[in-house]
Image (cartoon, rainbow, N blue to C red):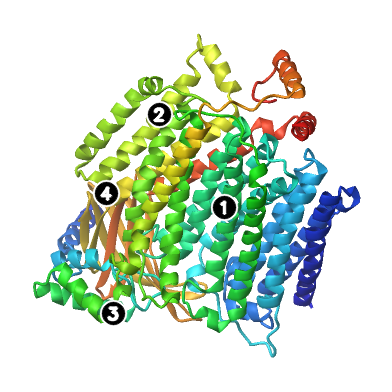
Amino acid sequence: MSRLLVLLAMLLVSAVAWAKEAPPAAADPAIEARMLALASQLRCLVCQNESLAASNADLAADLREEIREMMRQGKSDKQIVAFLVARYGDFVLYKPPLMASTVLLWFGPLLLLLAGGYALFRRIRRRSGAPGPELSAAERARAARLLESPGDPETP
Amino acid sequence: MIPEIGQFALSLALAVALAQAILPLAGAARGDAAWMAIARPAARVQFALLALAFACLTYSFVANDFSVAYVAEHSNTSLPLVYRITGVWGGHEGSMLLWTTLLAAWMFAVTLFSGHLPEDMVARVLGVMGIVSAGFLAFILFTSDPFTRLLPAPPNGRDLNPLLQDPGMVAHPPMLYMGYVGFSVAFAFAIAALLSGRLDAAWARWSRPWTLVAWMFLTLGIALGSAWAYYVLGWGGWWFWDPVENASFMPWLVGTALIHSLAVTEKRGSFRSWTVLLAICAFALSLLGTFLVRSGVLTSVHAFAVDPRRGVFILILFAALVGSSLVLYAARTARIGLGGSFDVVSRESSLLANNVLLTVAAASVLLGTLYPLALDALGAGKISVGPPYFDAVFVPLMAPAVFLMGVGPLARWKRASLPELAVLLRWALAVSVACGVLLPLVLGRWSPMIGLGLALAVWVVATSVVTLRERLRHASSAASAWARLRSTPRAWYGMFLAHLGIAVFIVGVTMDKGYESQKDVRMQAGDTVELSGYTFRMIGISKVQGPNFTATQAQIEITRGGRPVANLYPQRRIYTVQQMPMTDAAINAGLFRHLYVTLGDPLNATTWIVRVQVRPFVSWIWLGCLVMAIGGLLSATDRRYRVAAAIRRAGAAEIAVAQAAR
């Protein structure tokens, strides 16, 4: 029995000896992290709707490699994006640039909020202090009946 | 033979739907009781016919009848039984059949639970739903027939898309469609009220439980879809602002506004026209979502060219339904009364402000989803609108909405006092600001978004506690406090829970976005990687044979401080029929963290890319949705919707008389 335990212990020790810390998948983790951060803001051009970072398509893999290469050459994120836009157009950007045709897109929500806020303000001001609707005789009688009858106030 | 029966049932259902669309509405307009009485039996027959058609299609799938083109497209003999059943809604035609069958199920439910409604109301509600049903049945029969034969039959089918061969497929689409289609009931009630001119508290009370149940299904459907995307797409994202997701999220936002607005209309009689408009919009957005997803206009603009009839048909259907209801709304809106008055500071105002924020958020999502399509159609260039845009727009709109969510339940109806509210809320405010500033420091990393998220979550919890305390304020003893809690209506607990669900959800999103960690490594048997205190060790790689796929499977043993935590088995699968590769992530799910392991590409015979992730609090995202849904269900089953139908009928008649006299 004790011999078996020793054998087991030796096996365990040897297993620990074989184990090594797994190396990062990327050659340069810093560039990889930067590339992924940038690629998650870009669209894979051949997929239905996936970011360049998440896509498994061949073109996406090639583009990721191209971005890594440009980063190794010391290009800034801005330069890389400019290069990709020059080649593929604004379609590649998940965050469309502010230009004449996207003014409405970027300021639309703000305009909607202002319009909604204005309508809200006008409505509340008109309604506040306005007299409530007059009760008819029938309604008054019903209200009186309800007030007299004991019961759950939530159930009219 | 069976598919022909199904098709015949569909055709009969269309005939019944047309009768249901015309006669009860005409009867209600003319005051003809016999015509109105057609509504209920027609709806029930329609449900039976659609259930029969659905059963026929299911039978064709189960029996591997590849002479039915739709079955041949979406199934295969090697497909496990459960996916042959769910394959029924794995494609366009079957999805539309599911949509229409669920619509009929909702109509059937209306016939069951409408005993207390006036006959003309039932006739109008079912008549409007009959119009919708007729439109969709015509769409199915003329453009998307699931029973079309394919002769000669192929020996085997082309298989269900492997992405859809997942337990998520069982529950997600039916739940989501139940939500989508459920808003048709609120829509039908709104149109019926516009037609009859009786837009009163009684109308709001009738349509509230239906709206709440539909909202509950939609919440669950969206949450299930998100959870499915999280574990099946392999990289752990749970929301992508994909147009198809947006299509389900827009009705949810407007539906959320609607249930709040209905509450005000029921309790105070205010916001009537606004509530009606929201009910129309919620269903219009459900239809628009169906149109966007089903017409193919989203995945590719060219899908119109493939089968232009489908896109055009559903666009016409959409325009006709929404257009006519808006015209009706415009014509009748002047006659809608105003209801009770209220002050600038009041519960009504805070709910109205929240409504504005929710609808602006929905409109912004709509803008971002349609903008690229519109630009492309105008020839003004191709752009993409993705997560960076939606995040930038959404957070500034939702943060004040969540803030108001804490104030609303404490503000009095009609007129609240700011100083009083400030006194009530000062501690809640102090605690949430302190938590927003300090908690991230304790957790190890501070950023504005983490601070904001945690502050908002704590705010919701703290204000909920204050609301509960206010409810018990005048209770002198434990016994009277208990009595107060027991007499508190279930709807109030529903609201309480749903708001707490939002807090749980915000915690999940904030913690996961703020503190997730991941590593991509090359691993062979025996290698280890450390992440956030967990040690992941690859034990080995093996081949596994599934029912209709082969897989490479890694065994990853996870320990923490030498103690075993779990063994995970991530896979790379190849589905044999379509030869499609799939990543099957392995997750060890806990309440406070998920350990998420994905097997990537092989580098050589023994070394693989492996991604390990530690996702703190990520399950709270879906837990929060579940809590919200339970809240919705609690509210929908409130006592006052269930009992005293007779009293209510008398009351409704009295109100009608009073309104007619006014």
**Do discs 1 and 3 belong to a common subunit?**
no
**Do discs 4 and 1 belong to a common subunit?**
yes
The quadrant in which the N terminus of chain B is found is bottom right
- Mark 3: secondary structure: helix
Task: Residue B514: give its label.
Answer: 4
Task: Residue B15: give its label.
Answer: none
What residue do we see at 68% from left, 69% from top?
Answer: B58
Amino acid identity at mark 4: Gly
Amino acid identity at mark 2: Thr
Image quarter for residue B518? bottom left
Amino acid identity at mark 3: Tyr
Q: Name the residue under label 2.
A: B463
Q: Mark 1 lies on which chain?
A: B
Q: Name the residue under label 1.
A: B282
Q: Mark 3 points at which residue?
A: A88
Task: Name the spot of residue B546 as percent of width and height, x first.
Answer: 48, 72
What residue do we see at 78% from left, 62% from top?
Answer: B17
- Determine the CA span between mark 3 and mark 2: 50 Å
Q: Which chain carries label 3?
A: A
**Near-viewer residue (B48 or B299):** B299
Image vertical order of residue A7 relative to residue B11, above or below: above
Specify few, some or many for label 1: CA neighbours under 10 Å numbering under 14, 14-19, or 20 or more: many
Specify few, some or many for label 2: CA neighbours under 10 Å numbering under 14, 14-19, or 20 or more: many
- Determine the CA span between mark 4 and mark 1: 33 Å
